Image (spheres, grey):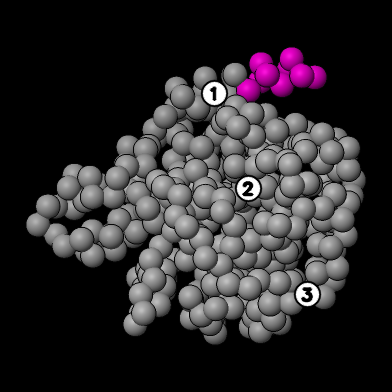
Amino acid sequence: MLARSTELHHPLGITVETPLLIPSFSSKGFGFSKDKGSEIKAIFTVASEYLVDTMLLSAYDISYRHLDPIESAITELVFIDSGGYEISDMQDLSAIYRQPVQPRDWTEEKLRKVLDDWPEHVPAVFVSYDKPDLRRPLDEQIAAARRLAADYQHQLHTLLVKPESERQHYIQEKNVIANVDELKGFDILAFTEKELGNSILKRMTNIALIRLAMDDAGVTMPIHIYGSLDPITSVLYFLAGAELFDGLTWLRYGYIDGFACYQHNYGAREIGIDRTDDFIKAKTIRDNLSYLVKLSQQMRVYLLEGDFEKFEHNANVLRKSFELLRTKIRRIQ
């Protein structure tokens, strides 16, 4: 079984257990107005009432006040993404169209300012700096991430691995495997879903091969997949060996019967056609958070019994996909 659970022990004294389905917030893909600023600020206000375990915020959005500064703990653990997503042209797989990006200046110094100002009593995970036009070899990515982590030892740290040159669209999984011993010292290893490969099976395979290499080297930190937070692919990547998942799908769609559907179809079926659009959005957000809690519980039960039927939905798809992954891994090895 590649799927697993890990306890993350934070220097501030809390412990969280994976798998984690992490609700994410980002100004990218949401609107702006002259008077009210980013739409994500209003969405966060609605959702924050129902958040409990984890959430992910962008340092870019915090820096430019697209989100209000965090003064006290809302969830047990907060992931502070490094801001590269907000300034890139890359859209995650849940985006329905490519929205033009008009980013403001973003540097490592600006990221550090956000991290410097982060409340010391609020447990967080700081993600290594990345930028769309910053492509560098893996060893340089690791060295830069180590320098950043050394200055904030009171928090946990994620190494986000990116493609190594401008011509590369995907991470170099063989290079990651060859340098697996150098990954030690970080708390979490992360990849974006899109940069893991050009198909679900390819992404699952790369996750599994990296996970197996980490196991062989005694590198026990969990793998985090950025951009994956839906009822099917999150579980598929979990079966391949990843343990943390975040994305914006939960803000864009409604979760129902194991699928992500158009939000207003969800409203018509589950809420009522007499409800206002704003009510449907707010209710869908709350319902999706409950769905993610249930799904994470099903993942944990699967770990205990290894039975795909413990997943309320998509058991056959999950079983067949996992068997296909196993076959692929055997051929490679």
Say whether disc 3 or disc 2 marks the residue closer to the N-terminus. 3
Q: Tell me the CA gap for discs 3 and 1.
A: 40 Å
Res 181 quadrant in image: top right
Say whether disc 2 or disc 1 marks the residue closer to the N-terminus. 2
Q: Residues within 10 Å of mark 3 (few under 14, many from 20)?
A: some
Amino acid on which disc 3 is placed: Tyr
Amino acid on which disc 2 is placed: Thr
- Helix, strand or loop under label 3: loop
Which residue is located at x 45 percent, y 45 percent?
94
Residue position marked by numbered label 1 in the rendering = 321
Confirm or deny contact between disc 2 and disc 1 (CB under 8 A): no
Of tags 3 and 2, which is closer to the observer? 2
Magenta range: 325-333
Residue position marked by numbered label 3 in the rendering = 152
Residue position marked by numbered label 2 in the rendering = 192
Q: Tell me the CA gap for discs 2 and 1.
A: 20 Å
- Helix, strand or loop under label 2: strand
Residue 32, given in percent of the width and then of the height, sits at: 39, 71
Say whether disc 3 or disc 1 marks the residue closer to the N-terminus. 3
Amino acid on which disc 1 is placed: Ser
